[in-house]
Image (cartoon, rainbow, N blue to C red):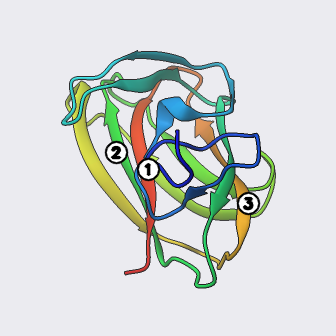
């Protein structure tokens, strides 16, 4: 994919804009997850079977010279009653600086998608690796279709 293309996070010296729509399935590293066909607008693949201890990594995410203010993720959950968890956004390693955390519970089904925004707790500029790490339940609690960062 061309530099800056949606979902083009990856090695080889390419970067992807933090302000583009980054497909969850375009991760350059992952732990404990699988992809599946997605019924959300735009189709493609989502990442599912996510529970505490899972992670998704994206190399070469370019934030530019001005820090974003928000993180937005397209999430779905068919988790059982009482099952929930958190999606953490971390920089440069799975245990790096935490920029945001979205807590999620059942949205009505594993393909019942919601765009969930959260304000960032810190600032970031330049090119970084971004990790989505998952905390909370040992049971599957979320599917991820895409994410992006926003200046507003």
Q: Which residue is the site of mark 3?
A: 128
Residue depicted at 68% across the width and 33% down the height: 28
Q: Residues within 10 Å of mark 2 (few under 14, many from 20)?
A: many
Residue depicted at 47% across the width and 49% down the height: 5
Residue 34 lies, with reference to residue 116, above or below; the image says above
Which label belongs to residue 74? 2
Quarter of the figure that contains the C terminus: bottom left
Say which label, 1 or 3, has the lower sequence index.
3
Residue depicted at 55% across the width and 30% down the height: 137
Say which label, 1 or 2, has the lower sequence index.
2
Compare residues 17 and 80 and report the one nearer the observer. Answer: 17
Q: Quadrant of residue 126?
A: bottom right
Residue 115 lies, with reference to residue 54, above or below; the image says below
Judged left or right of residue 146, residue 34 is right
What percent of the width, then of the height, locates residue 75? 35, 40
Circle 3 or circle 2, nearest the eye: 3
Judged left or right of residue 125, residue 96 is right
Q: Residues within 10 Å of mark 1 (few under 14, many from 20)?
A: many
Q: Are marks 1 and 2 in contact (CB under 8 Å)?
A: yes
Q: Assign a secondary structure to mark 2.
A: strand
Q: Are marks 3 and 2 in contact (CB under 8 Å)?
A: no
Q: Which residue is the site of mark 1?
A: 147
What percent of the width, then of the height, locates residue 98? 69, 62
């Amino acid at each position: 994919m061309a530099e800056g293309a949606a979902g083009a996070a990856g090695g080889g010296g390419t970067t992807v804009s933090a302000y583009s729509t980054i497909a969850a399935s375009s991760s350059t590293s992952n732990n404990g997850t699988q992809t599946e066909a997605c019924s959300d607008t735009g189709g493609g693949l989502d990442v599912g079977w996510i529970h505490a201890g899972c992670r998704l990594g994206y190399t070469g995410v370019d934030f530019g010279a001005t820090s974003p203010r928000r993180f937005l993720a397209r999430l779905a959950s068919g988790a059982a009653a009482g099952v929930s968890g958190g999606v953490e956004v971390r920089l440069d390693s799975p245990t790096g600086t935490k920029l945001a955390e979205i807590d999620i519970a059942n949205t009505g089904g594993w393909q019942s998608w919601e765009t969930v925004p959260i304000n960032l707790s810190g600032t970031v500029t330049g090119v970084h690796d971004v990790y989505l790490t998952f905390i909370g339940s040992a049971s599957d609690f979320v599917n991820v279709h895409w994410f992006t960062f926003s200046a507003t």
